[in-house]
Image (tube, grey):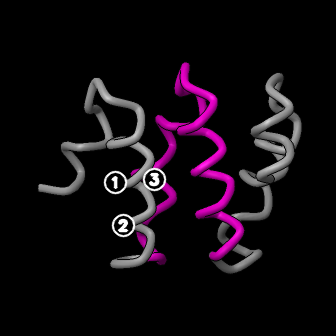
Amino acid sequence: ALIDYLEDDWAPMRAAAQAAMARSDPDAIMPVLSGLFADPEWSVRAALATTLGGLSADASGPRLAQLAADDDAKVVAAA
């Protein structure tokens, strides 16, 4: 299942999986993505910010603000 790829060892796979999941079921995505906010790879967190930016502000606003305060400037730029 697609959700299994969120724990893949390869960061680009985790990033692609979360984007695909957001497209397929944007209303149910937030609980599923919660583990990616602390992903050690900046690219996964940046992809998450991009994905959240495409969702409704009600669903993504607080989480997007969290990524906008990330320690990595690339993640902040994506948020």
**Mark 2–mark 1 distance (CA, rounded to whole Å):** 5 Å
Question: Magenta stretch containing residue 31, yes or no?
Answer: yes
Q: Nearer the viewer, residue 21 or 34?
A: 21
To which residue does mark 2 refer?
A: 20
Query: N-terminal of the two: label 2 or label 3?
Result: 2
- The amino acid type of the residue labelled 2 equals Ala
Residue shown at the point (68%, 80%) measured from the top left:
56
Q: Which residues are magenta?
A: 26-54
**What secondary structure characterizes most of the magenta part?**
helix
Quadrant into which the N terminus falls: bottom left
**Mark 3–mark 1 distance (CA, rounded to whole Å):** 14 Å
Mark seen at residue 71: none
To which residue does mark 3 refer?
A: 31
Q: Position of residue 57 (x, y in %)?
A: 76, 75
Residue neighbourhood size for the residue with mark 3, other residues' Cα within 10 Å, grouped as few (<14), some (14–19), many (≥20): few
- Mark 2–mark 1 CB contact (< 8 Å): yes
Is 63 left or right of 18, judged from the image as shown?
right
Location of residue 38 (image quadrant): top right
Q: Position of residue 35 (x, y in %)?
A: 47, 35
To which residue does mark 1 refer?
A: 17
Q: Position of residue 51 (x, y in %)?
A: 59, 63
* In front: label 2 or label 3: 2
